[in-house]
Image: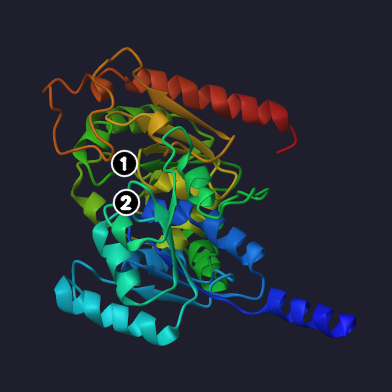
Amino acid sequence: MKNSRNVLKFKKQVTMKKILIFHTAFIGDIVLSTALVKNIKKLYPQSEITYVTTPAGKAILSNNPHLKEVIAYDKRGKNKGIKGMLSLAKELRENKFDIAYIPHRYLRSSLICFLAKIPSRIGYDISEGKLFLNKKVTYRKDLHEVDRLLELLGTDCDDKKLELFPSEKDKEYIDNFLSDKDIKDKKIIALAIGSKWNTKRWPIEYFNELIEKLEKIEDIKLILVGGNEEKELSVKYTDKTINAIGETSLLQLAELIRRCDLIVTNDSSPIHIASAFDTYIMAIFGATVKELGFYPWSKNSEVIENNSLTCRPCGLHGGNECPLKHFKCMLEIKSDFVYERILAVLKEKESENPCN
């Protein structure tokens, strides 16, 4: 009889759980959640995990081996409005999930999971939809976003590395893209010149100055990276620089960044994509600050910022214009300083790996 109880207990422990992650934030936020995905799978190794996110979020999560399915919820497009919410809630309800982790703090996310009748709904105590949660976790502003996300699990996690999974086709695409670009024996530096918000963009004139300086160095190859929206920026370069803006999918971009020695980037998704790899990250922060918890999740990184201003941060996400109209947070970070930091980092990396 004792053995029977042990068998029953064991069966209870390995019972498969159907788990939902509901996170429809920006691309960078989805990348930061990959440590959460991995640790949910470690906590519930027999589970099936489904992730609801944006179409762009689905693209960056492709090939993740811990996920059974990624559902694209186009909340601003074909799935917008009450009809889209109810349709998704119905689809989720039919899946009979046991647990929903809801990092996204907006009302819609918690409400959909409530309407889907998921019995355990876990989110933050500051969520707009906390009324629809039955387990509320303290949102700690003193933590990096990766650690904040892992707080939802209520247990210690040892492996917090971010993960992205470019496919073999993605790697082959980048092989072909770079095949005739004269990169052999060169230090490859990516420049991510864009951001959704104007106040998070280092001035394009400063990027142009930086490009002009770096193009004069024979053993450096520059690659401009970004999406189609960055095509509108007035970036100036010669044939010594590779323009990959709008030429890659998100995971192809990840593979391209992985192959770079260093990336100079605004406070935008390339920071978090690069944090999944060993590429050195030089992040330029203007309207935002590290203390908000979205700095590079990598020891191989630095944040360049103007710490003399009391007006920073002026928002969590930045904005379209400086509230005080002076934009000193970015204008006072000169291209000469960034240039000297790049040279110093490359020299340090070379001294650490003299044979490379």
In this rendering, is residue 8 above or below 301?
A: below
Q: Outermost residue, front direction?
A: 1
Q: Determine the secondary structure under disc 1.
A: loop
Residue 23, image quadrant: bottom left
Q: Determine the secondary structure under disc 2.
A: loop
The residue positioned 27% from the left and 30% from the top of the image is: 287
The residue positioned 66% from the left and 76% from the top of the image is: 46
The residue positioned 42% from the left and 24% from the top of the image is: 339
In this rendering, is residue 339 above or below 93?
A: above
Q: Is residue 181 visible?
A: no
Residue 346, image quadrant: top right
Q: Earlier in the sequence, mark 2 or mark 1?
A: 2
Label 2 and label 1: CA atoms lie apart by: 32 Å
Neighbourhood count class around disc 1 (C-alpha, 10 Å): few under 14, some 14–19, many 20 upward: many
Answer left or right for 278 relative to 203: right
The amino acid pointed to by label 2 is Ser
Tell which of 319 and 41 is nearer to you.
41
Q: Is residue 112 visible?
A: yes
Q: Which residue is mark 1?
A: 193
Numbered disc in front, either 2 or 1 = 2
The amino acid pointed to by label 1 is Ile
The residue positioned 61% from the left and 59% from the top of the image is: 39
Q: Which mark is drawn over residue 234?
A: none
User: Residue 320: x, y in percent?
Assistant: 15, 39
Q: Which residue is mark 2?
A: 127
Neighbourhood count class around disc 2 (C-alpha, 10 Å): few under 14, some 14–19, many 20 upward: many
User: Residue 197: x, y in percent?
Assistant: 22, 42
In this rendering, is residue 180 above or below 331?
A: below
